[in-house]
Image (cartoon, helix red, strand yellow):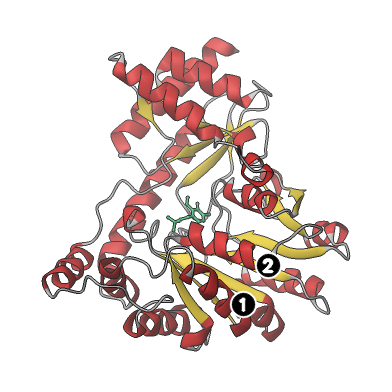
Amino acid sequence: MLTDRINTLSESITIAISTLATELKAQGKDIISFSAGEPDFDTPQVIKDAAIAAINEGFTKYTAVDGIPALKTAIANKLKRENGLTYAPNQIITNNGAKHSLFNLFAATIQKGDEVIIPSPYWVTYPELVSYFGGSVVEIETHDDNEFKITPEQLKKALTFKTKMLVLTSPSNPTGSVYSRTELEEIGKILEGTNIIVASDEMYEKLIYDGEFTSAAAVSDDMFKRTVTINGLSKSVAMTGWRFGYMASHNTELIQATKKLQSQSTSNINSITQKAAIPGLDGSADAEIEKMRVAFKERRDEAVRLINAIDGLSVYKPNGAFYLFVNIKEISNDSMQFCKDLLEKKGVAVVPGVGFGSEGYFRFSFATDIDSIHKGIKRIEEFVKELK
Ligand code: PLP
């Protein structure tokens, strides 16, 4: 009954862990979860107020497929002000979350025979979508000793005449690493003279703890032309449930193509969300966003300190996002088993690295209160001691 295409998709490995965590919780066990991919903070009030006003004003009908003009202007202004990128409204489209932006982008650009370079560890959705649309995934392995970043040499080696796209995620899920301007410039130089698209996923842009954030499209004119900038408000403004994302590209033909696809699939994104997103983009929520960032930074510092003090574990201190990618190679090369045992024996849920394409690690999300971080890491320490 099912198509070959749908059968290429696999269920997320994180689901195995969260299902087990839910079962154990239902049995009354005391479970601490570090598996969340979303902020534990509430959406800022100024955004909620804009949504309530939209409902009361009756802003509840279909809108333009690519988004209302005021929202697209807010995105264009944000990209100019914060990222140094100049996009016209017809170079921008809003989608139902950045995941949907990526779905539309891959649908419009990837087909059988195309190779897509994805640095590993990666966010699981990328390889799934590439395979779904018939493309081939070319992984570039990265490790903690290089801050989980690809080098220009690695990129050069991975290029073939079939390479269609390079996916960059900075700050990264699951490692939190952030590419500097110089590193992006070097990547850009390797791609010069090719038609390769760079898909730059900038979802965690506002969650930077050390150094600065640079958009891939901002490093050169050549990179601006080849890069599709993907962003949203889920992570940096605590709006995961609202479903808002967008993509921007110099290539208006590409934006038009994804608009056509969206017009025949989901139409516009939720009208209320569109009104609510504006204060998330125009600076009105900046004080709230900064409060969250400061809290995340404190948690990162504390979690990194405590984990690095555990004999047998080590973790690279990330500059962004809200994840730690913890190295367990001294203890185990089976991250799935490690995570299952940790959950069953100590009631701590973390996600196995193998789910992100990197064995010998687990992902620890610090989008959790500081008391849970203290209590949970203590349990991890006991677990590791018992294993040694
Ligand atoms: N990109 C990255 C790297 C992510 O981690 C996520 C969410 O987990 C997304 C995109 C998708 O975010 P959303 O669809 O909520 O906008």
* Vertical placement of residue 339 versus 359, above or below: above
* Residue neighbourhood size for the residue with mark 1, other residues' Cα within 10 Å, grouped as few (<14), some (14–19), many (≥20): some
Which image quadrant is residue 258 in? bottom right
**SS at badge 1:** helix
Q: Is residue 30 visible?
A: no
Instruction: Determine whether the beta carbon of the residue marked 1 sits less than 8 angstroms from the nearest atom of ligand 1.
Output: no
* Vertical placement of residue 374 versus 387, above or below: below
Residue at the spot 31% in from the left edge and 71% down from the top edge:
274
**Mark 1 vs mark 2, CA separation in Å:** 8 Å
Q: Which residue has dot 2 on it?
A: 109
Total marks in image: 2
Q: Are marks 1 and 2 in contact (CB under 8 Å)?
A: yes
Picture coordinates of residue 149, whole percent (x, y): 68, 54
| Front-most of residues 60 and 97 | 60
- Quadrant housing the C terminus: top right
Residue at the spot 87% in from the left edge and 58% down from the top edge:
157
What is the three-letter code of the residue carrying label 2? Thr
Residue at the spot 16% in from the left edge and 68% down from the top edge:
55
Left or right relative to 164: residue 220: left
| Front-most of residues 205 and 310 | 205
Picture coordinates of residue 49, whole percent (x, y): 16, 67
Q: Reading the chain from its start, which is encountered first: label 1 or label 2?
A: 2
Left or right relative to 281: residue 249: right
* Residue neighbourhood size for the residue with mark 2, other residues' Cα within 10 Å, grouped as few (<14), some (14–19), many (≥20): some
Q: Which residue has dot 1 on it?
A: 254
Q: Is residue 351 visible?
A: yes
| Front-most of residues 346 and 64 | 64
